Image: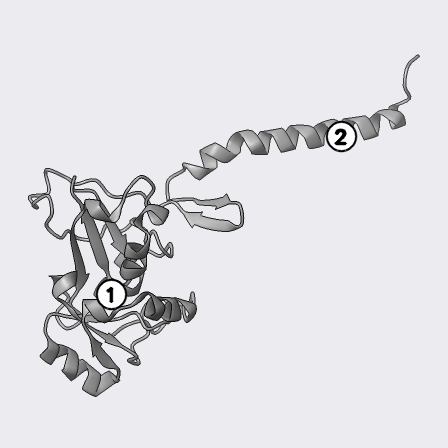
Amino acid sequence: MMLHRPALRPLYFAGLAVVVLLGGLLLAPWRSQSPGNAVLVETDEICVVAPPVPHDPNSGLGLHAPRPVPADARCPVCGMYPARAPEWAAQVIFDNGDTQFFDSPLSFFTYLQDVGRYTRGRQASEIAASYVTDASSGAWIRAKDAVYVNGSSALGPMRAGNLPAFSSASLARRFVNARGGVLLEVGQISPQLLQNLNGERRHIHDDSSL
């Protein structure tokens, strides 16, 4: 028995819905691997795909020397582009020369709390060098030797206390005199402080300069 044309319509639309659903499922892996570090959704969390940048042997830089931030590099902690606020940028270099870049010292220290969460298959013991930007000169300085300022009026790319770094205590004090805050050494940057500062993050990019 032949079906009348009106009776075919529900079957047609049901089949179309199935095709669209299957197409979306098949294309999802390709979207997640597309250029621009796509966003993946895993359970209840949104994870930014920010793979380490391999060392370029033709760059003229040593394997563990600090390097310029690529324009398309993304912070594995917050997803921002560190090259857009170079005065706040930080980086870690793994023993094979792969590098992760960060939008601020706050993201850098947050990353060190759980390296494997933000860069799968890696661990903190593989980090050979780490650098932050000297807020007074723009030069790279070793993160372990820097002096940081907490509680200043310089809120940084994420509108939070992003711990501006300085190569010396005298430069940090000069900054504190102008912008407020207190001096901190690496050993004084605690997990609780990072948790408090991360709670203040706001995805607003204006007025982020030092």
Q: Is residue 205 visible?
A: no
Residue, disc 2: 14
Q: Which mark is residue 158?
A: none
Name the residue at 25% across, 53% down: 101
Q: Amino acid at mark 2?
A: Ala
Mark 2 or mark 1, earlier in chain: 2
Q: CA distance from mark 2 to mark 1?
A: 53 Å
Residue 89 appears in the rendering = yes
Dot 1 lies on which element?
helix
Please name the amino acid that badge 1 sits on: Trp
Residue at the bottom extreme, as displayed: 177
The reply to whether callout 2 and callout 1 are in contact (CB within 8 Å) is: no
In this rendering, which labeled residue sits more in front, label 2 or label 1? Answer: 1
Quadrant position of residue 89 = bottom left
Q: Position of residue 151 (x, y in %)?
A: 30, 79
Q: Which residue is mark 1?
A: 88
Q: Residue at x 30, y 65 (%)?
A: 106
Front residue of 143 and 55: 143
| Residue 84 point in image, percent of width and height | 29, 60
Q: How is the model colour-coded? A: one colour
Q: Secondary structure at mark 2?
A: helix
